Amino acid sequence: MTDTVHILLVDDDPAEYLIMGGIMKKVTSAEIHLHFCETIEAALAFIQSGKPASVILMDNRLQPQCDFRETVPALRQQGFIGPIGVISSSLADPYFQKFEDYGADFRIDKAELDPTAIEFILREYVTKT
């Protein structure tokens, strides 16, 4: 039997949802339900609603917030205790070296997000129930 995993993607670009949906369909170790929010406010409402989220993939930059240093702590303050991964098209900024200080569990370049990377994230960060 395949485990069901709920992944919440928070990204202000709807095209990323389509791209990630295609990637998630290729993951064989779990049945993935991909949820999508375009704003931090929508993501906070999602968490508050009690809908399941096994892991959150948070885009580094969402408007009007500056970057994950503001959005990830907001998710933690809302009570989300699961893994949060920061995704970005570039991890070059020095603040990415201190991602754990802001409540993130991992960071990954969007170009590296493929079925193998998702399988690794699920193995390393998602608790089997």
Image (spheres, grey):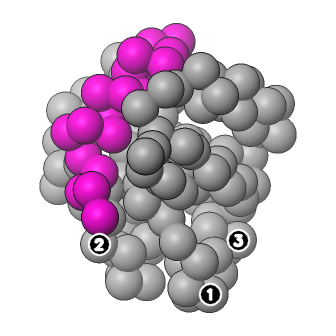
Residue 83: image location, x then y, percent: 31, 56
Q: Mark 3 sits on what residue? A: 42
Viewer-side residue, 8 vs 39? 8
**Would you identify the image quadrant in which residue 75 lies?**
bottom left
Identify the residue shown where x is 49% and y is 65%.
Answer: 53
The magenta-colored residue range is: 108-129
Residue 105: image location, x then y, percent: 24, 48
Furthest residue toward front: 1
Work out whether residue 62 can be spotted. Answer: no
Residue 41: image location, x then y, percent: 67, 73
| Amino acid type at image mark 1 | Ser
Tag shown at residue 81: 2
Identify the residue shown where x is 25% and y is 37%.
Answer: 123
Query: Does 83 sit above or below residue 92?
Result: below
| Amino acid type at image mark 2 | Ile
Q: Mark 1 sits on what residue? A: 49
